[in-house]
Amino acid sequence: MASPTVSILEGNTFIVSDLAGNINATPTDPLGLFAWDTRFLSKWILTVNGTVPNVLSTDDLQYYLAQFFLVPGTGTIYVDSDVSIIRRRAAGAGFQEEIIIRNEKPDPTDLQVRLEAGADFADLFEVKDQLRKKGELYQRVRDSSLVLGYSRDTYKRETWISSSVPAEMDSRGLSYTVHLGPHEEWHTTIDVRVPTAAQLLSGEDYAKPEVGVPPNGAARRAKDLRSWTNTAPKLSSSWAPMERIYERSLVDLAALRFFPGVVPGGSLPAAGLPWFMSIFGRDSILTSLQALPFVPEMAATTLRALAAWQGTTEDQFRDEEPGKILHEIRYGEMTAFTERPHSPYFGAADVTPLFIVLLDEQERWTGDRGLVEELEMEAKAALLWIDDYGDRNGDGYVDYQRHMETGLENQCWKDSWNSILFADGSNSKLPRATAEIQGYVYDAKLRGARMARLFWNDAALADRLEREAEDLKRRFNRDYWIEERGHFALAIDGDGRKVDSLTSNIGHLLWSGIVDQEHAAECLEKLLSDRLYSGWGIRTMAEGEGAYNPIGYHIGTVWPHDNSIIALGLARYGYRKEAARVAMGILEAATFFHERLPEAFAGFRRDMTRFPVEYPTACSPQAWATGAPLLLLRVLLGLEPVGEHLIVDPHLPEQIGWLQILDIPGRWGRTDAFARVREG
Amino acid sequence: MRLVSARACWDLRHSTARVTDGSLIDMNTTMSTKPTTIQRFFDELSLRGQEPLLRRATGTIEWNIEDVGRWWVRMNHGAVHVSQSPQSADCVASCDAATFTGIIAGKENLMAAALRGVVHCSGNVGLGLSFQRLLY
C-alpha cells in the first residue's frame, strides 16, 4: 500500500510529498514537484543535525497551501524535543516554502539545517511507464541560486532554488548554520521556481527569481477561492454529510482549474491529480456538464478551448482528422520529441459528439446563444466528422481504430486496452463501435438540429439531422440488442460481432435517450441487478462476466462519474426512485473518502466489505468524480431548464429528509430549489 | 441543402490557399529548405485572404527565419495579411530554415517543436500556436 501523501496544486503545477513535507521519489512513483508534465524536483528532504524530523501534524489548509509541524528526532519518545519546526508551502510557479525553527528551551542551541535537493526531470509518461532518460542532468550554483537542470539537444528544463536567508549551496542542496538564543526563532523562505509558459517556449534563460520578495500570491488565491465559493449556490440539508460533500466538490473544482492560453482569462477543469493535470476533451466536457447548475462559466471556456484546437488535418500519428475534438494535450519531453503524440492527441471517438451535447446543454442552462452562434462552424465541422471520419467502415456507426502503436487502443471512456471484452473474457476486434458512443451521436444530432433551427437559421440541416437521429435510433435498437441476454451489446466489433458483456455502458444509453421504450425497463432491471449494482454503485462490468474483476480498472470497479450519468439517464426515463437510490449509494460512499470521491473504487459487494474499498492507483481529486455529486444533486432535485425557467421536480431518497439549494444561476437569473422527502 | 463530406468541405476551404499562379503546391511532398520555398509559402499565405479556421485569432505573429528573413503575419478574425515591413508583433517566433520548411511541409508539429526548443516563441504564445492551423 502506498504511504500517505500530501498534495497541493495550482494550475498545472502540483507538489506531492510525504506527511513531513519531504520528497524522496523513486523513478516510478508520483512524488515530486511537477509542472508541464515534468518532474522538476524528485528529492526535497529537510534534515536537522543530520536526521529527518518526526511529524507532529500535517494540514493541507487549502488546495494550494500545506503546513507541516515537525520535531527533530530524539530517538526516544521519553525525551521532549526542545526545538519545533514549521514548514509552510504554497504552490504557484513552482512553490515557496517558509521554514520556521523555534528554540523552545531557555538555553541557546546550534543547529545544522539542510535541504537535500535533486531533480530527475522525468516526463509523467516515464514515471507511469517506467522509462529511462535520454539526456544529461546537471547541477550548478549560479546567482546565489542552486540550478538543477536537464538538457537533451535543444530541449532544456531547469529548476531554480533560492533562499531569503543566505545558504551554503552545493550541487546537492542547501545548508544553514543556525544559532538560536533562548526561545528564539529563525526562519527562511525558499523559492523553488519552474518556468512559466512564456519562459518555457521563449528559449531564454529563466529570470532569476527575486529573492526575499514575498512571492507566493497566497492572498490573491485565497481571495479568488472565496469569490469562487461565494458565487456558487448555497446548499443546506438535513443529511449532514451533504453540505460537506458539496463544499469539497466546489473547492476541488477550483483546485483543478486549468487556464488554457488560447482562451484569455478563462478556466476549464483539468482531468485529475496526479496523472492528468492537463486538458482532456472528454473529462473537461463531462465535468463542465456536471457543474452547469453550479458553476456554468466553465462550459464556455471548455468549448472555446476545444474549438481552438479542433482538428484540421489528417495526421495518423496524432489520430487527428478534420473536425475532430481532441483527447489530450501534454507538454513533457516525450511529447516534445514526438515519442508520444500528445501535441495534441485526438484518439477519442466520443468527444466530438459530446462537444455538440455540451454546446447545446450550456445554452439551455445559461441562455448564452452567442456562444452557439460563435461556434457554428466548429459545431458543423464536428457533425460532419461524425458521419465521415467517425464511421470508418461505413456501417452507420461511429467506431475507432488507432493508426499507430503509440495511440490508444480503446478510444472511448473505458480507455484501457482490456475493457471491450466478450462475456467469455476474450478481446474484441478493431475497429470497435461501442454502444454509448452511438447514444452520444444520437443526442448530438438531435441537439445539433435544435441549434440549427433556433440559432443557425438552417432548417434543412435540422430536418436532416432529425431524420438521421431517428434512423440511428431504429437501427441501434435492432442491431445492438442481444435478445437472449436481454440487454444491449457493449460494442459491435471489427468482425461485426456483438460484444456481449453486460456493462455500465447501457446506463449512458438512457442518458442519451437512444433506448426504445420497450427496452428501457430491461435496462433498468439489469442496472439495478446484483450483478451490476454493488450496493455503493453500478459496476463498470457485471459480476459473472468472464473478465469481471472488482479491482479491474474498467471491468468491475465503480466509477462515480459513470454513476452520475446513469442516474441522470434513469431519471430521464422516469425511474426517479432508482435514480435516487444510485445517487444515494455514491453520496454515502463519499463519506468514507473524506467527502472526496476518487475516480474509481472497488466493485466488492457492499454487504461484504461494509465500506467502499479504494482502488489502488486512482486519481484524487479527479475532475469528473468531483463533478459527480453536483450532477447527482441535479438528479435528486429534478432540475431541468424549460424555456426561460428552471423546473424543480425533486425525488429524494429516504436518508435525505430535506434539501435546499439557493441562488442557482441560469437564464432565469438566480432561483432556489427546495425538496422534502415524500411521505409513504 | 446537401452537405458535402467533411473531407471535401475542408479541402474546399483550403483549396484556394494552395493555388498561386495557377499551379497547385502539394505541402506533403518533400520541400527543399531553400529560401525560395519559404518565400513562396508566405507569398501564398498572403493570397489566401480569408481563413475561417483562424477567425478566432487576432494579432500579429512575427516569423524570424534564421538567414532567410522576417515576415509579419497579421490575423484579424480570419483575414490573413502577410508583410515583410517591420511592425509591432504580439508574438515573435523564430527558428532555422530547415525547421520552418519541416513545419510547413507537415513533417514537424509546431507545438512539439516549441516544447523541444527548436522554435522559440515569445509574447502571445496561444496566438503563435494557432499558426499550426494555417498548415495541413
Image (tube, coloured by chain):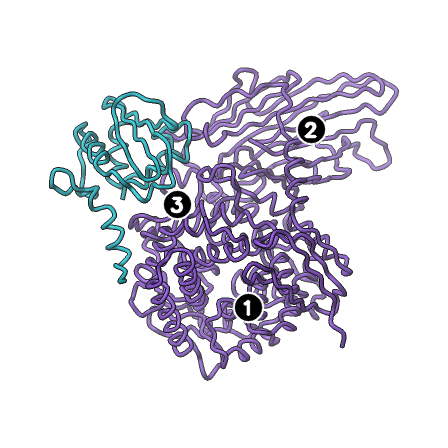
Chain colours: A purple, B cyan
Question: Local crowd at mark 2 within 10 Å, few (<14), some, or many (≥20)?
Answer: some
CA–CA distance in space, label 3 to label 1: 30 Å
Label 3, label 2: how many angstroms apart (C-alpha)? 47 Å
- Mark 1 residue crowding within 10 angstroms, few (<14) / some (14–19) / many (20+): many
Reading the image, the residue beneath label 3 is A309
Mark 3 or mark 2, earlier in chain: 2
The image's mark for residue A135 is none
Chain on which label 2 sits: A
Where residue B36 sits: x, y (%)?
16, 29
Q: Which residue is mark 1?
A: A569
Q: Can you say whether B92 is above or below A272 in the image?
A: above
Query: Furthest-bottom residue in view?
Result: A484
Amino acid identity at mark 2:
Thr
- The reply to whether callout 3 and callout 1 are in contact (CB within 8 Å) is no
Which of label 2 and label 1 is nearer to you?
Answer: 1
- In-image side of A158 versus B62 (left or right): right
Residue at figure coordinates x 44%, y 44% from the top left: A329
Same subunit, tags 3 and 2 = yes
Residue name at image x 34 percent, y 62 percent = A461
Residue underneath mark 2:
A47
Does dot 1 land on a helix, a strand or a loop? helix
Instruction: Identify residue type, mark 1.
Output: Gly
Indicate the position of residue B10 as horizontal and vertical percent values. Answer: 27, 51
Of residues A168 and A603, the one nearer the viewer is A603
